[in-house]
Amino acid sequence: MGRSRDVRFVSSGVKLPSASASAPSPSPSPAPHLLSAAHPFAHVGRAIDAAARRLGAYLPRVPVARADTAPPPPVRRHGKDGGGGEEERVLISEVAVRGKDGEPLERPELEAAAAAALRACRPNAALTVREVQEDVHRVVESGLFRSCMPVAVDTRDGIRLVFEVEPNQDFHGLVCEGANMLPSKFLEDSFRDRHGKIINVRHLDQVIKSVNGWYQERGLTGLAYNRAQVKRDVETILTMGIMEDVTIIPQPVGDSNKVDLVMNLVERPSGGFSAGGGISSGITNGPLSGLIGSFAYSHRNVFGRNKKLNLSLERGQIDSIFRLNFTDPWIDGDNKRTSRTVMVQNSRTPGTLVHGGDHPDHGPITIGRVTAGVEYSRPFRPKWSGTLGLIFQHAGARDDKGNPIIRDFYNSQLTASGNTYDDTLLAKFESIYTDSGDHSSTMFVFNVEQGLPVLPEWLSFNRVTARLRQGYEIGPARLLLSASGGHVEGNFPPHEAFAIGGTNSVRGYEEGAVGSGRSYAVGSGEVSCRMFGPLEGVVFGDYGSDLGSGPKVPGDPAGARGKPGSGYGYGVGVRVDSPLGPLRLEYAFNDKQARRFHFGVGYRN
């Protein structure tokens, strides 16, 4: 059988049970079909070579001629006179397959397999020695026989050509050593139906090639050095946010089959102060009334363990948010890369999204919230991540003087419990899918919140929301489609209703001017095209509806203010890339023939 020059064991040795005492002593020569010359993906360890040689002892070299070595021996021809000779062509009257001792084989299927491998040797055929030798090679290359010897015998009816074959041993088990990364099921499936059958060397070669392929596809070398995995590890370290630069350099050691991986790290400054500004979407009157300023301190490597501390303060004419977050991005001892975030927040935000449009003699309503909770997040799959959390919230409404109130000017209730504040313990689950960081990629967010009435006065409700965004590249333009929707069931405060309309909802309307309901659905489509430099032009259209659920909100704030419950808008805009994200300036018309400018920072939710 020819040498398989592209085959090697890469990470596992194969051992078969020792031969019985009655078995013939194996040849010390390794099987030529198991060991090969060097190959660009050769991954052979000492233990693997030793195991291959032990297996090769049971499959010695085939006693047949090779085209690339010495000329083939002549066919042994036994005549009545005991003489022998070699002729150019000999007429064969009969062809048979027998065992090494000349007796019929115990397994008829082996005799049939050897006969099926013969091509030239047929009864009543005139054969040359070369043709006989080629058929000998075919029998051995079937993979079932360790040797094959042609014997020609003169009989009364003519020359009888007998192929004396020696089958391989039966397969009774396999031991894989050193395959720390190769799944055991890989080899189990390959040999599942082979137990108790004759060892087929062709099948063994195929398994070896498949093992090589498994390692090659994963970029593995004989010491399990995976270049693709190293690259992913570098990216993972960089995403920690505490390293300026990461390089990994493989350095060979004394054993040529091993390397040391040297990691060079350049650490970033751990903490610092920052300041910035933004716009509140909940304020609709006045060109500058929505501006807010922010001040923050962050430490990215608390205790030298990559734990993160963030302390921030945001302040506007009405808005104020104080937030403290402490994050452990990878909990010690967890192999699922679970992170934990502890959060405390005190905020005051405008109530105009739901309770806007009050009488001029009455100032704006604000919603005060004190929130504390813990969240656990982890990746499910490369593009999926999930979050579980438990959050307590103490929330209520205040007038422009900061006094707690429970009803607005339209006598609509402002809390669900009828008290000045509502207390809620929320269990939260969120799952996010995104196929890349590109804004034109696919993104899906699913969120469930359940109010837990641990105490009788605590609120109990269930809120479900979902958002989907899909981008398409169409020549130089980009089409972006997005949809969102949600529903809330149970006893919930009216300021938690879904507000529809505004910069991140239906453009052409003020914030929350379309409606507020227990349910909602919003769809949007926009086409953008690069104009020049960082400037991009956009054409868009939006539609939103409360799905008829506005009157079901406690106090019906939307009905009291005459909100339509559904509407659409369309318009054009420009965007400019900035370190804060895209700066958006848009001019929109709505279905009431009103027109409005919208300014925003970052992509739409």
Image (cartoon, helix red, strand yellow):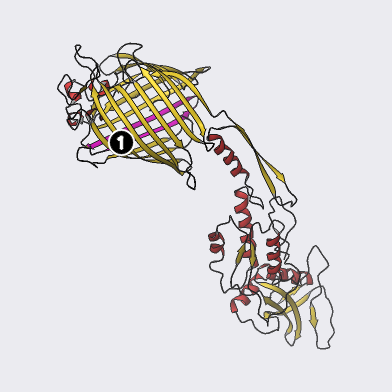
Residue lying farthest left? 411
Work out which quarter of the rendered image holds the C terminus and state it.
Answer: top left
In the image, residue 540 sits, relative to residue 427, either above or below, namely: above
In the image, residue 505 sits, relative to residue 181, either above or below, namely: above
Work out which quarter of the rendered image holds the N terminus and state it.
Answer: bottom right
Closer to the camera in the image, 477 or 170:
170
Confirm whether residue 123 shows in the render: no
User: Seen in the image, is 386 located left or right of residue 73?
Assistant: left
Instruction: Tell me the residue that label 1 is attached to.
Output: 392
User: Seen in the image, is 102 located left or right of residue 561?
Assistant: right
User: Seen in the image, is 587 located left or right of residue 472?
Assistant: left
| Residue 17 spot, x, y in % from top left | 63, 73
Residue lying farthest front? 303
Q: Residue 426, located in which quarter of the rendered image?
A: top left
Q: Residue 132, located in which quarter of the rendered image?
A: bottom right
| Residue 173 spot, x, y in % from top left | 59, 70
Instruction: Determine whether the residue tagged by mark 1 lies in a helix, strand or loop.
Output: strand
Question: Residue at (56%, 66%) from the top-left corner?
Answer: 191
Confirm whether residue 36 shows in the render: yes
Q: Amino acid at mark 1?
A: Phe
- Magenta span covers which residues? 461-489
| Residue 504 spot, x, y in % from top left | 35, 24
Q: Residue 444, located in which quarter of the rendered image?
A: top left
User: Seen in the image, is 268 located left or right of residue 562?
Assistant: right
**Overall secondary structure of the magenta section:** strand
| Residue 238 spot, x, y in % from top left | 56, 35
In the image, residue 460 sits, relative to residue 78, either above or below, namely: above
